[in-house]
């Protein structure tokens, strides 16, 4: 049963793989049909094996076949092998010649009993076949219902995600300028849409373990990175303002106003001033 299940799962996986290819060739379409049939056959076999292991099956069929075989062995022990084989295989119609040879060596009453027992076995096989067919159909119907329910649930979840994604995009756009639309700027808006598509893919697509770990780390690091960017932007603004003061209040050879407290020393380059202001900011923060 485990081997049947493995073969069924492999066929199912291959069917889904091919169905995801929207540009299938005729040969691939034929392969899909063949795999679907193989999958359905394996499902039917799984249903049959599972049913044959139930107490209900043993009571309705296994035990009854055993009683028929026991009666045939008692009635014609020298022909038990052939008669029980016909019972088990339901092969009376295809082995009629062999059966007739056996019946010729029996009395009329024995013939009647043998044929009666074999007919009971054939009738039992018919009931068994009908029962297995019904179980297979019920299983197929259950699988269709489960598949439809799963599809509906997936569509509902996708719609809920898209609704939430739209709301959160609007919220994030207020804090991140690169997520805001710009009228008439096709290049900007295209880049923005690519960012949104990438964000969606992190939820809707499957990723390798390493890629998934990186996505998680980037997501968790986002608030800290944003805080650092805001700090650098503030330092940059402060540096720009002080450099403006420096250029406006630079003393001349003829003298001039004394530098204001905190004004960069004369001749201080941009890099030195940047790190000095950053250091001052950190000291003030502490």
Image (tube, grey):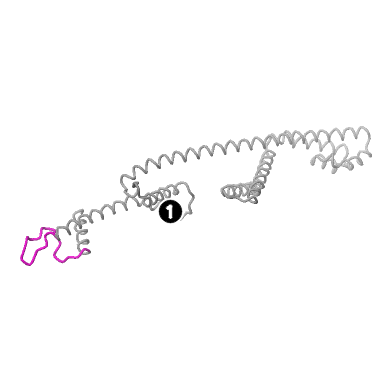
Observer-nearest residue: 56 or 133? 133
Residue 259 colored magenta? Answer: yes
Residue 236, above or below 52 = below
Q: Residue at x 18, y 54 (%)?
A: 284
Observer-nearest residue: 197 or 187? 187
Which stretch appears magenta? 248-270
Question: Which quadrant of the figure contains the C terminus?
Answer: bottom left
Secondary structure beneath label 1:
helix
In the rendered structure, the answer to whether residue 60 lies left or right of residue 162 reads right
Q: Position of residue 274 (x, y in %)?
A: 22, 61
Observer-nearest residue: 271 or 282? 271
Observer-nearest residue: 212 or 247? 247
In the rendered structure, the answer to whether residue 1 lies left or right of residue 220 reads right
In the rendered structure, the answer to whether residue 5 lies left or right of residue 218 reads right
Residue on which disc 1 sits: 213
Residue 62 colored magenta? Answer: no
Res. 2 in view: no
Q: Badge 1: how crowded within 10 Å, few (<14), some, or many (20+)?
A: few
Q: Position of residue 40 (x, y in %)?
A: 66, 43
Question: Which residue lies most toward the front here?
Answer: 184
Tell me which corner region of the image, top left, top right, bottom left or bottom right, holds residue 41: top right
Res. 91 in view: yes
Picture mark count: 1
């Amino acid at each position: 049963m485990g081997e049947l299940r493995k073969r069924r799962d492999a066929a199912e996986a291959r069917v889904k793989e091919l169905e995801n290819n929207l540009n299938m060739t005729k040969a691939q379409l034929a392969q899909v049909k063949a795999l679907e049939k193989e999958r359905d056959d394996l499902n039917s076999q799984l249903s049959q094996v599972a049913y044959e292991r139930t107490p209900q099956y043993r009571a309705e069929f296994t035990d009854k076949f055993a009683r028929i075989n026991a009666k045939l062995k008692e009635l014609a022990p020298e022909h038990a092998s052939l008669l029980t084989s016909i019972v088990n295989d339901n092969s009376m119609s295809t082995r009629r010649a062999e059966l007739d040879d056996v019946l010729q060596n029996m009395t009329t009453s024995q013939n009647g009993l043998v044929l009666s027992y074999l007919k009971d076995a054939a009738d039992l096989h018919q009931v068994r076949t009908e029962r297995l067919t019904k179980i297979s159909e019920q299983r197929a119907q259950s699988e269709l219902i489960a598949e439809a329910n799963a599809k509906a649930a997936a569509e509902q979840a996708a719609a809920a995600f898209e609704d939430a994604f739209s709301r959160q995009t609007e919220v994030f756009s207020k804090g991140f300028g690169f997520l805001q639309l710009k009228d008439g700027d096709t290049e900007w808006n295209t880049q923005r849409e690519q960012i949104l598509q990438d964000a969606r893919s992190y939820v809707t697509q499957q990723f390798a373990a390493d890629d998934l770990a990186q996505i998680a780390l980037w997501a968790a690091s986002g608030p800290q990175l944003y805080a650092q960017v805001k700090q650098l932007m503030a330092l940059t603004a402060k540096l720009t303002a002080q450099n403006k003061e420096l250029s406006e209040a630079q003393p001349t050879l003829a003298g001039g106003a004394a530098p204001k407290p905190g004004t960069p020393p004369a001749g201080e380059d941009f890099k030195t001033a940047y790190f000095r202001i950053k250091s001052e900011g950190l000291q003030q923060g502490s």
